[in-house]
Image (cartoon, helix red, strand yellow):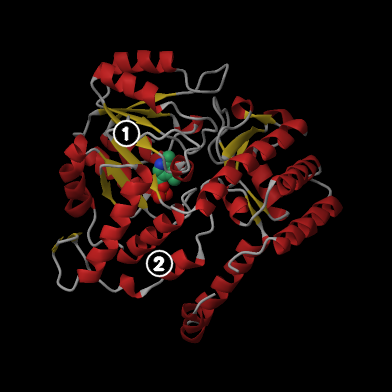
Amino acid sequence: MSIILKNVNEVDSEVSEILDLEEKRQKFKINLIASENYASTAVMETQGSLMTNKYAEGYPGKRYYGGCEYHDMVENLAIERAKKLFGAEHVNVQPHSGTQANMAIYFAMLDVGDTIMSMNLSHGGHLSHGSPVNFTGKYFDIVSYEVDKETQTLNFDTLRDLALKHQPKLIIAGASAYPREIDFAAFREIADEVGAYFLADIAHIAGLVIAGLHKSPIPYADFVTTTTHKTLRGPRGGMIMCKKEYAEKVNRMVFPGIQGGPLMHAIAAKAVAFKEAMSDNFMKYQKQIVINAKTLANELMINGFDLVSGGTDNHLMLADLIKTGITGKEAEETLGNVGIIVSRSTIPFETRSPFVTSGIRLGTPAVTTRGMKEEEMKLIADWVTKSLNNIENATIQNEILSAVEGLCTQFPLFK
Ligand SMILES: *Cc1c(COP(=O)(O)O)cnc(C)c1O
């Protein structure tokens, strides 16, 4: 792909071989993992660049190391572009990941033992919102909300009752496995009623928000956190946006509070990704993600699958496999063997363990980056169906595997 890889080959044949294998895997499998994407070669080049060779603790103009003049330039560029893209008052591009972005908000605004109200993990929430196995579950008192049993969507009456009862200091909206639009204005109202801070975590939907395909939380939330590598299609990393009044507190918590030297190669790559996100192509891309998700969802339902909440408004969907008798784990393995990569997923009111689960999560950001459209979504839906309906039939599974590889060849990556 680039000059760097040639050097890897000379220095370390073992890692080089692994990189080769991974390149083939990415090129010849259909990736339906909703949180993944393929960053552009421009983003990857920047992330693999000489910007990694520098300590730049601090912020532009206020570093604790000499020689940061170009790192200041690139970080300022990333910040200004992010502000423009989202209409944010203040941006911090230093968080190493989405989880670190969230951690900075919690530690900046809360005391250990304070109450956070967030979405239950098995209903679509994220580990870093309060799971008992995460630091959040250990340091804070977590009140989780769930989706409505009937509609499998958020019910703001129930949410409001819960907030009134527990008086959380922070309310979090945002999810990793919620296929519907999130009403940030309704969250704001509840937060105001109980005097809570409101954090919107848009890790999954950031790209859709930029393109206006999902309502932006910026006017409503005190803090907005995101990853830069999901629908946003940048390098792996995190970012915080907030109102000016919290800027100082948030910055000081990211550094020196919870991080040391920023990953300047990643920050430079974020700047490149933000430039890409300002283009018409990016807007078209985001639109196609949503069209593809709707098409895939409809085809799967036509083929007899139950989808949580009966469809999707965004880039992902959850197939509820209970009726089929196979578990999420079995489905993930079976599809993996035919070159279709999905992740098992808990579904609302899950009865199986998070390792087994009763569902799979499917998303369209990655296949859309390859240029696939509605026609390809129909093919993929049919292959998913056929594969899962014929788990024991090796001939059928092999046929699907060849078809998958054929389609991937027609939509090459890293051109
Ligand atoms: C992916 C995700 C994160 C965190 O991402 P990492 O970069 O893996 O730490 C945070 N919140 C939500 C809702 C996510 O989906």
Q: Pinpoint residue 215: horizontal percent, then vertical percent.
A: 44, 33
Residue sitting farthest toward the right: 395
Identified by mark 1, the residue type is Leu
Q: Nearer the viewer, residue 234 or 24?
A: 234
Contact, CB < 8 Å: mark 2 with mark 1?
no
The image quarter containing residue 187 is top left
Q: Secondary structure at mark 1?
A: strand
The image quarter containing residue 296 is top right
Q: Is residue 326 above or below residue 374?
A: above
User: Tag on residue 88?
Assistant: none
The image quarter containing residue 194 is top left
Label whose residue precedes the other's in the sequence (2 or 1)? 2
Q: Pinpoint residue 245: horizontal percent, then vertical percent.
A: 17, 37
Residue at horizontal 34%, vertical 50%? 82
Q: Is residue 211 left or right of residue 391?
A: left
Residue at horizontal 31%, vertical 63%? 263
Residue that numbered label 2 is attached to: 47
Q: Can residue 325 be seen at all in this image of the molecule?
A: no
Q: Secondary structure at mark 2?
A: helix
Residue that numbered label 1 is attached to: 199
